[in-house]
Each structure stands twice: as structure tokens, then as C-alpha cells.
Amino acid sequence: MKTTLKLEEAAQFALGILVFGQLPYAWWVFVALILTPDIGMLGYLAGNKTGAAMYNIFHHKGVALLIAGLGFYLHSDITMLVGVILFSHSAMDRLMGYGLKYETGFKHTHLGQIGK
């Protein structure tokens, strides 16, 4: 099952790259922005509960799809870019084993504990 989940996340990351390719931005923009959703980790400065909430907002694929869809509906390339980056980053993170966080600590995720 673990392999199947990784393949699914790899396919979603590839989809994010494909959709980005349809936007009017140079490829260096994707590379420059792909790690920006990790700014959500700053919430951990206020504790585990706030940290988990902030991190999960920035890494929730539903939020990413909502933003991308809003950008598509409004014909806003920058809004679509934000959604695509959030979606692609989340898929990339999950491919590497970093899941949505529980309030018990940064290493506790819906995919299991990080760094077993």
C-alpha cells in the first residue's frame, strides 16, 4: 500500500507541474516558490496546536484546489499559481512522507511518525 500511495502522490505532483506549464510563468518561478508553503511551520512558534493548524492550512490539498479553482473562475493567473504551488508542494511533501500534522507535535502526521 505504501508504494501505491507514493505513486499516487508522484502522479499528483506531476499533474501540478503539468498545470503550472499552462500558466504564463517561467519555470524558475515554480522552482523558486515550491518550498514557500512551508512558511506554515512558523505557527509552531506559538505551540503545537497553532502550529498544526497553520501547517495543515498551507498543506491541505482541498484548500489548494479551492484557490486554484477560484483563480480559474476569476481568470486570475496569480491565484491559479498560488493554488498550483500549494497543491504541488503538498503532493511532494507526502511523496517524501510528510503528512498533515496532529496537535501532539510536528513529527506526528496522518502518514505516521516522521523519523522512525
Image (tube, rainbow, N blue to C red):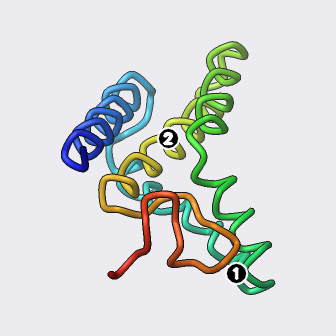
Residue carrying label 1? 44
Residue beneath the point at 44% across and 51% down:
89
In the image, residue 48 lies at what x, y percent? 72, 80
Judged from this view, the residue extending furthest toward the left is: 3
Q: In front: 99, or 69?
A: 99
In the image, residue 65 lies at what x, y percent? 59, 30
Residue beneath the point at 65% across and 66% down:
40
In the rendering, which numbered label is found on residue 87? 2
Quadrant of res 66: top right
* On screen, residue 77 above or below 108: above
Crowd class of label 1 (few under 14; some 14 to 19; many from 20; radius 10 Å): some
Q: In front: 6, or 40?
A: 6
Quadrant of res 54: bottom right
Q: In front: 111, or 47?
A: 111
Quadrant of res 31: bottom left
1 and 2 marks in contact (CB < 8 Å) = no
Amino acid type shown at disc 2 = Phe
- Quadrant location of the C terminus? bottom left
Q: Secondary structure at mark 1?
A: helix
- Quadrant location of the N terminus? top left
Amino acid type shown at disc 1 = Tyr
Left or right, residue 28 beside residue 101: left
